[in-house]
Image (cartoon, rainbow, N blue to C red):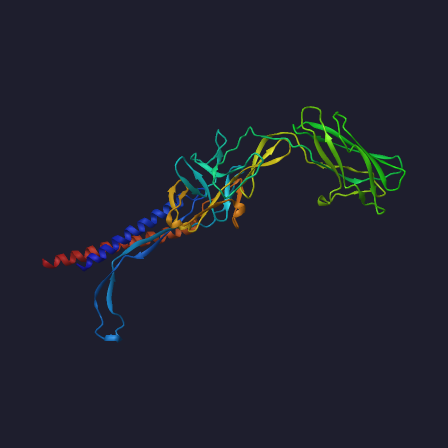
């Protein structure tokens, strides 16, 4: 009977808008879920029935068929992957991606993608999500070098890690020498051998009787022997700029403690750092600007930069790269399968998966100490809820009205 079509159309409307309410309810329920991406429902006409041709007028007919629709269906439930608001948490291992891409996490059998970066270190020093899945990335080698873009691994930090000592290779002296014959300037610092032991270094500059010349003498109060470079002369041009030498070469310093014998340079001025070594009238203020050696260091803290690089901070003042977070991208975000807990699984519809780091991806960075909030728009969801409620009521009224009309038809036989 014709009224059955109206009943079926009403039922399809009830089912469809019930599904839309399910989606709206899920969106609202996850308004505080980190990294959550909201969904929307798209409708499509179910099908049409031809009631007969209307071509009696030939080519002048306004239409060829009389058609009546048979209801509505859910065409798709689309996920909105727009950026959520950054929420500062103050926890260094809370991470948020700004731009396109996903963090990668892995359990014992499967790999997943997620925008929720609420990570922590477990008892074994592995970076994991709240479900214990391992965050994927690239671990540094013993020299602090990271090769991103290859095979990923579970990120793990050895919190007992010791930064190895570095032998001094260069000491930079800068400033000004000024004075008459016999006047001197002493500069000093500590240098480090291959075992991280500190040794006092003293360089004394003394003005000679010759214009624009200073003698220097290098000494090591803590002991040790030196093969060459302990004494010499530094000369300046008539305008006060350094003439020669640009650096003092200390050859064959033996710390006499079992460490390696090594060479190092005392560099007079450094144009790259804007530091000069001059002879002008005025202050006699030459000093050691820096030296590049250091002792061993204990790991104090971990910082994560915008490229997703985990930097170890050591008590000897050094920073060292320990690992880097991997970022995955796919050709079609809408092709990802949602598997719960904020996790996505790549499918064939998502296309090819690209795995690299934030530094290699355009307009993508990692924010440490923050989480990406849900992108649910509550005002929009409440508006959609109201229209869905009215649509549901209207479809219910179609069913009740069609039922009353059927009842009238049935009563005709009485």
- Can the viewer see residue 79 in this picture? no
Q: Position of residue 118 (x, y in %)?
A: 48, 38
Q: Residue at x 29, y 56 (%)?
A: 72
Foreground residue, 366 or 297? 297
Determine the image quadrant of residue 409.
bottom left
- Can the viewer see residue 384 in this picture? yes
Foreground residue, 314 or 27? 314
Q: Residue at x 36, y 52 (%)?
A: 386
Foreground residue, 152 or 3? 152
Using residue 245 as the reference point, say whether residue 82 is left or right of it: left
For the N terminus, the quadrant is: bottom left
In the picture shown, does residue 254 fall above or below 105?
A: above
Determine the image quadrant of residue 226.
top right
For the C terminus, the quadrant is: bottom left
Q: Residue at x 34, y 47 (%)?
A: 22
Determine the image quadrant of residue 194.
top right
Q: Position of residue 186 (x, y in %)?
A: 80, 33
Q: Position of residue 139 (x, y in %)?
A: 52, 37
Q: Residue at x 75, y 27 (%)?
A: 225
Using residue 366 as the reference point, say whether residue 191 is left or right of it: right
Farthest-out residue, left: 414
């Amino acid at each position: 009977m014709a009224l059955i079509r109206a009943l079926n159309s009403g039922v399809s409307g009830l089912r469809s808008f019930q599904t839309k309410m399910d989606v709206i309810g899920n969106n609202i329920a996850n308004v505080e879920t980190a990294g959550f991406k909201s969904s929307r429902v798209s409708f499509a006409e179910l099908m049409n029935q031809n009631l007969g041709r209307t071509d009696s007028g030939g080519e002048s007919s306004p239409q060829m068929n009389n058609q009546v629709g048979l209801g509505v269906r859910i065409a798709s439930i689309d996920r909105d992957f727009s950026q959520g608001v950054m929420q500062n948490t103050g926890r260094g291992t809370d991470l948020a991606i700004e731009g396109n891409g996903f963090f990668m996490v892995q359990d014992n059998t499967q790999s997943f993608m997620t925008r929720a970066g609420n990570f922590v270190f477990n008892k074994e020093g592995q970076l994991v999500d709240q479900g214990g899945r391992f965050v994927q990335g690239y671990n540094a080698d013993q020299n602090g070098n990271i090769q991103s873009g290859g095979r990923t691994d579970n990120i793990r930090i050895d919190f007992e890690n010791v930064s190895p000592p570095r032998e001094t290779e260069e000491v930079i002296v800068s400033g000004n020498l000024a004075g008459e014959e016999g006047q001197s300037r002493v500069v000093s610092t500590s240098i480090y051998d291959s075992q991280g032991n500190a040794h006092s270094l003293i360089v004394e500059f003394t003005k000679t009787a010759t214009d624009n010349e200073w003698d220097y003498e290098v000494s090591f109060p803590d002991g040790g022997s030196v093969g060459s470079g302990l004494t010499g002369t530094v000369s300046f041009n008539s305008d006060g700029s350094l003439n020669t030498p640009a650096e003092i070469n200390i050859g064959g310093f033996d710390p006499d403690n079992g460490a390696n014998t090594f060479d190092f340079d005392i560099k007079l001025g450094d144009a790259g750092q804007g530091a000069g070594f001059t002879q002008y009238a005025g202050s006699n203020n030459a000093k050691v600007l820096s030296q590049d050696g250091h002792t061993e260091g204990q790991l104090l803290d971990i910082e994560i930069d915008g490229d997703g690089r985990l930097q170890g901070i050591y008590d000897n003042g050094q920073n060292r790269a320990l690992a880097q977070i991997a970022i995955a991208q796919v050709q079609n975000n809408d092709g990802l399968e949602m598997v719960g807990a904020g996790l996505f699984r790549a499918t064939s519809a998502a296309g090819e998966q690209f795995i690299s780091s934030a530094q290699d991806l355009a307009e993508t960075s990692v924010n440490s100490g923050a989480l990406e909030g849900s992108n649910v728009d509550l005002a929009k969801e409440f508006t959609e809820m109201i229209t869905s409620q009215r649509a549901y009521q209207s479809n219910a009224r179609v069913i009740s009205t069609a039922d009353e009309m059927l009842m009238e038809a049935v009563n005709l036989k009485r």
